[in-house]
Image: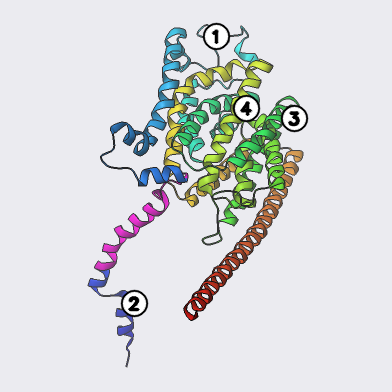
Amino acid sequence: METSFDVEVEKVGTPDEKSKVSKDEPGKIKKFFKKYFLEGQKLNPKQAQAIANLDENAPLAKRLMVKHRKEIGIIVPFLFFQIAWWCLAIRHDYFSYFGQSGGKHQNGTFQNGTHPDTEPGSGVPNYVLSITMVFGAMIGGMTSEGGGAVAYPVMTLALQISSGVARDFSLMIQACGLSAAAFTILWMKIKLEWHSIIFCSLGAVFGLIFGIEVVDGLSSPTKKMTFVCIFFTFAFALFLLNREHKRKTYDSIRNFGIWQGVVLVCTGFFGGIFSGISGSGVDICSFSMLCLLFRVSEKVSTPTSIVLMAINTSIGFFWRGLMDGDIHDDAWAYFTVCVPIVVFFAPVGSFLSSYFHRQVLAALIYILDTVALITAFAVIRPFTTNLIILSACLLIGGSVFFFVISKVGQKLMQKYEAEMAFQRKENDNSVESLNIASLQETNEGIKE
């Protein structure tokens, strides 16, 4: 007969069992970190094969180019930008900018001769932006949101810098940081979705110019809330999608055709408009379509969005700096003190994220966008009725839009899987028919 004491002993366990459980804990923790933070890079097939076939006795140059591409991919852009920056810093005394506020010189005036009171700077020392972009560059290199997803909300919400300056700075700094990260990605031969890069870039060029020249007339609070609400709704949709346990993902867009190309061009156009307003947008729009509609893995979508954004921000920098010639002194000053920071930490972020599990990359997006939304509600003043209605419409409308895109993506995936299953069945039947025919010919030959 089982006593209550016996039951209690079974629940608590013997000392040996407790010791065994405690010994297993380090193994579980190690397994967890290996799964989520050391999953391994998703390289293109040629590079993966080259690493697998590398002879240990191969010449040093070959081993460096194959086995240590990642180190070279970080060092090359770092040295290029650092050498250029230090030459200019020594020649033009950039070091004095770190302790100043905005584009202000030591005599209290800005480079264009205007007085500080008339300018949209926040009075925050420039080195604060340098510290901010340590994290911004890392996040920009690790996720699909770019460094502007950190720089823009921090500058406009926390530091109270004007949205125009924040937008220009985001475009400028990402043009350098993400270009360095893109070089690292391309050099390491990490797998990319080139359809997205090409077609989204085509639409983004026109969307970016349209956003800068036409749509940028929105008020600063409207821009801020539009930015955080759209980004949050995508993060929420991605969270719901990833609740599907071990969901099916692909390394590229399946059965790419005309309608997929049109979708990517339109995605690039609307993403370019957001980039023209806030300095970020086309990367997250491309990422959302790849993940939700085409079910491409975050491991491929993230580096793809980084390369795409490097192209887009470089065009934006060119347009604002040379075509408009209207970049504010504050933006130039912030850019000057942040370049040597981002050109190192953005490639490092890309390198680290290439080893992360896709769920870790997604979790970073959840956290970033949730914090940005909460901060916006807490900081933006006055929070008018129109702004409340706009925010509610963006949150609800964006959630519905991304939910519908996700469901359409699910239907497309099921259709593709059904077609592949049918094709495999047809191939199996063909092989079986050939085997039967071959066997019959053999039997007839024996009879003869």
Kind of residue at disc 1: Gly
Q: Is residue 299 left or right of residue 352?
A: right
* Mark 4 → mark 2, Cα distance in angstroms: 60 Å
Specify few, some or many for label 2: CA neighbours under 10 Å numbering under 14, 14-19, or 20 or more.
few
Which SS type dominates the magenta stretch? helix
Q: Which mark is residue 252?
A: none
* Mark 3 → mark 1, Cα distance in angstroms: 34 Å
Q: Can the viewer see residue 267?
A: yes
Label 4 vs label 1, nearer the camera: 4
Of the image marks 4 and 1, the number of the one nearer the N terminus: 1
Q: Label 2 belongs to which residue?
A: 11
Q: Secondary structure at mark 2?
A: helix
Kind of residue at disc 2: Lys
Task: Tell me the residue at 61%/63% (across/down).
Answer: 423
- Seen from the viewer's position, the closer of residues 243 and 248 is 248
Q: Label 1 belongs to which residue?
A: 108
Q: Is residue 383 above or below residue 15?
A: above
Of the image marks 4 and 2, the number of the one nearer the N terminus: 2
* Mark 3 → mark 2, Cα distance in angstroms: 65 Å
Q: Which residues are magenta?
A: 19-44
Q: Which mark is residue 167?
A: 4
